[in-house]
């Protein structure tokens, strides 16, 4: 597998509890470079030129987000690191946080400098409570060395809701409200946390920032494809002998990622991007891993021939129905209706008309839901209907 450790460069090499081991590996040189040599405008230009896109799932161009927030009127601005990592099958952010909290904080401090922000937050998922002390320790050591200057970083812990990884629900949760997706516009760039302009980025996105600043946008954007630059960190699990976290240059194929890990000829399908991700049948194993094709947050779950596709899609939908915040009707009702319909197929009691109803409902949910959860909730249904229609048809028991 052609691995390229850029984001993961320090993982397993430094001691995440000892800042000295980070400083030996060029730690904080990017932060010092921006403070010494670059205006906030030059930083956003560099990030824009790098082509870096968000690694949290949506793939939004990072430089545009930073530029929009930097230019937004308003004195107080915030930086948020999204460490909620609730997507099914994703564990790469935990891997990074456990092994290299320093680079993440350096990336956040560069964002803070760019915005002129005084405060940054790490929104840590409830299940990662064990990382609280490690992160606190890293922040304290960095402060003691004076690297943060007048920027402070605080940790906020989640309470276990998948929807609170969605950026607007996350900010509601941080404000002490029930986590629900917000109507947009306004976007967080102009009205985010407490109504102030806010940069919110995934852990992996922020990890790329110091690398880009130190090595230059040109170094970064020669890796990858035209619209997907740099590397991606994948969480690989399921029916593979070697599950784990792997970093590959974007545009590498799914085959390059899982071959050697998966028992290739026994593989039935691969779910990429978690519960709201895409299902790729084994026949399409040469699919490139890019934002243009399939990617999401980089969860890769391999299923072998013993797995029942209906069972997987049904359970995926049960999860999404449970986690829907309920604010918009298409998602709240649509996921429930899908669970009922898929349960019929699961029992071998599907109706012929269900096939069309599932396809129609998928379209409505995608077009009309308020946030990414509802918009992408039916991906597994749409893809399985396309690639594994036989599995549905063999369980039709009536009209
Ligand atoms: C239901 C849902 C859950 C999400 N969960 C996460 C998450 O756990 N971590 C994350 O970084 N982004 C998550 N996102 C994406 C965020 O809304 C947002 O796009 C991201 O934090 C922006 O950072 P990025 O541009 O660096 O990717 C989720 C989106 C949706 C719709």
Image: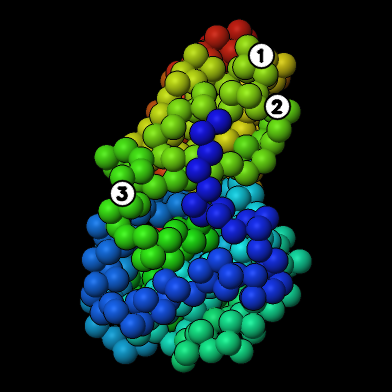
Residue drawn at x 53%, y 71% is 27
Q: Is residue 194 above or below residue 248?
A: below
Residue drawn at x 51%, y 27% is 256
Looking at the rendered image, the disc whose residue lies closer to the viewer, 3 or 2, is 3
Residue drawn at x 61%, y 89% is 144
Q: Report the residue marked by disc 3.
A: 221
Q: Quadrant of residue 21?
A: bottom right
Q: Report the residue marked by disc 2.
A: 239
Residues at marks 1 and 3, CA–CA distance in whole angstroms? 36 Å
Residues at marks 2 and 1, CA–CA distance in whole angstroms? 9 Å
Front residue of 306 and 25: 25
Can residue 351 be seen here?
A: no
Colouring convention used in this rendered image of the protein? rainbow
Front residue of 174 and 374: 174
Q: Quadrant of residue 199?
A: bottom left
Q: Neighbour class for label 1 at 10 Å: few (<14), some, many (≥20)?
A: few
Quarter of the image for the N terminus: give it. Answer: top right
Can you tell which mark lies on residue 266? 1
Q: Is residue 113 above or below residue 88?
A: below
Q: Secondary structure at mark 1?
A: helix
Residue drawn at x 72%, y 60% is 127
Front residue of 158 and 269: 269
Residue 238 lies, in percent from the top left, at 69, 31
Q: Secondary structure at mark 3?
A: helix
Residue 68 lies, in percent from the top left, at 26, 69
Residue 109 lies, in percent from the top left, at 45, 77
Residue 23 lies, in percent from the top left, at 57, 73
């Amino acid at each position: 597998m052609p691995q390229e450790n850029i984001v993961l460069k320090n993982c397993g090499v430094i001691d995440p509890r000892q800042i000295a081991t980070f400083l030996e590996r060029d730690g904080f040189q990017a932060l010092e470079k921006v403070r010494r040599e670059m205006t906030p405008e030059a930083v956003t230009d560099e990030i824009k030129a790098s082509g870096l896109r968000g690694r949290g799932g949506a793939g939004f161009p990072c430089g545009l987000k930073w530029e929009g927030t930097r230019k937004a009127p308003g004195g107080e601005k915030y930086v948020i690191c999204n460490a909620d990592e609730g997507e099914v099958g994703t564990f790469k952010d935990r891997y990074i946080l456990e092994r290299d909290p320093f680079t993440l904080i350096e990336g956040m401090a560069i964002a803070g400098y760019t915005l002129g922000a005084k405060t940054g937050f790490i929104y840590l998922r409830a299940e990662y409570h064990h990382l609280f002390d490690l992160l606190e320790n890293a922040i304290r050591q960095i402060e003691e060395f004076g690297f943060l200057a007048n920027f402070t970083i605080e940790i906020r812990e989640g309470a276990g809701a998948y929807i609170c990884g969605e950026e607007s629900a996350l900010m509601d949760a941080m404000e002490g409200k029930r986590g629900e997706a917000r109507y947009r516009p306004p976007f967080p760039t102009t009205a985010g946390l407490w109504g102030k302009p806010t940069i919110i980025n995934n852990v992996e996105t922020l990890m790329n920032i110091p690398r880009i600043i130190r090595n230059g946008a040109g170094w970064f954007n020669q890796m990858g494809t035209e619209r997907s630059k740099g590397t991606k960190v994948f969480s690989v699990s399921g029916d593979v002998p070697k599950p784990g976290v792997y970093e590959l240059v974007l545009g590498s194929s799914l085959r390059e990622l899982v071959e050697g890990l998966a028992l290739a000829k026994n593989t039935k399908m691969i779910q990429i991007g978690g519960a709201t991700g895409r299902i790729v049948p084994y026949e399409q194993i040469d699919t490139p891993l890019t934002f243009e094709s399939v990617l999401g947050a980089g969860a890769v779950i391999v299923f072998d021939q013993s797995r029942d596709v209906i069972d997987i899609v049904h359970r995926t939908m049960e999860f999404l129905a449970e986690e829907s915040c309920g604010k918009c009707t298409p998602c709240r009702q649509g996921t429930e209706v899908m669970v009922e319909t898929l349960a019929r197929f699961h029992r071998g009691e599907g109706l012929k008309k269900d096939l069309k109803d599932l396809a129609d409902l998928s379209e409505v949910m995608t077009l009309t839901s308020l946030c990414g959860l509802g918009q992408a909730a039916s991906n597994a249904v749409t893809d399985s209907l396309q690639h594994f229609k036989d599995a549905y048809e063999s369980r039709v028991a009536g009209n």
